[in-house]
Amino acid sequence: MDYYTKREKRRKMTSYIADSAVFIMGNCNVDSSLLITVPSVVDELKSRDAVLRFDLAKEGGLRVEWPEPEMVKEVREKAEQTRDSEELSKTDLEILAKALEHRETAVLLTDDYAVQNVAVQLGIQVKPIAQKKIKDVLIWQKQCIGCKKTFEKGDECPICGSPLKKKRKKRLKSKSHQES
Ligand SMILES: [Zn+2]
């Protein structure tokens, strides 16, 4: 039952519109061949690492496409309605325009609040880029306010009888979250 041609199948795959933050932060785990961005994104890449990531993504299949002028216009109008237009750079507008053009099949990767806001208003799917914050695991212990000895638990020091106070022992980084 090979109903769809290869080309049609390919079109049905989700692609991702990449905001400059995808290259600036470099912790996006989407395959480069599924990424689409606009030429002006390069203007926002200030660090060498970001430029390198952009170049590597291009080698890996990142598509750099000019935005459609009508789409840019539509985005600009929406941004004015939602009062986000002052917050949006030229690149932001173009990224949004590109996402709008691919609205049926693409997800916009961005952490920018104004961009997200306008995207949602335009019916564009949005996914944040930043890794969820690694949760610090706090380990608590009790310390005597008198003799400063530490204990696992209790309210009163078994040595000097002073009250015990909760004290942070250490922070462990959770290893359960790996996304790169
Ligand atoms: Zn004590």
Image: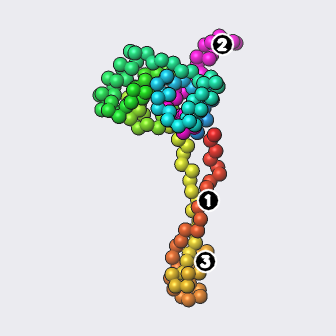
The amino acid on which the numbered mark 1 sits, given as a three-letter code, is Leu
Foreground of the two, 48 or 37: 48
Q: Quadrant of residue 57?
A: top right
Query: Where's the N terminus, which quadrant?
Result: top right
Query: Where's the C terminus, which quadrant?
Result: top right
Q: In the image, what residue occupies the spot 57% across and 57% down?
A: 136
Q: Quadrant of residue 94?
A: top left
* Image vertical order of residue 18 relative to residue 151, above or below: above
Labels 1 and 2: the sequence-earlier one? 2
Q: Position of residue 21 (x, y in %)?
A: 50, 35
Bounds of the magenta segment: 1-26
Disc 1 designates what residue? Answer: 172
The amino acid on which the numbered mark 3 sits, given as a three-letter code, is Phe
Q: In the displayed orientation, state which residue is furthest to the bottom.
A: 160
Q: Position of residue 118 (x, y in %)?
A: 38, 30
Disc 3 designates what residue? Answer: 151
Foreground of the two, 15 or 26: 26
Disc 1 vs disc 3: which is toward the camera?
1
Which mark is on residue 6?
Answer: 2
Q: Is residue 109 left or right of residue 69?
A: right
Tell me if mark 1 has few (under 14), some (14-19) or many (20+) residues whose alpha carbon lies within 10 angstroms of its own.
few
Q: In the image, what residue occupies the spot 58% across and 19% down?
A: 12
Q: In the displayed orientation, state which residue is furthest to the right.
A: 1
Tell me if mark 3 has few (under 14), some (14-19) or many (20+) residues whose alpha carbon lies within 10 angstroms of its own.
some
Q: Is residue 90 magenta?
A: no
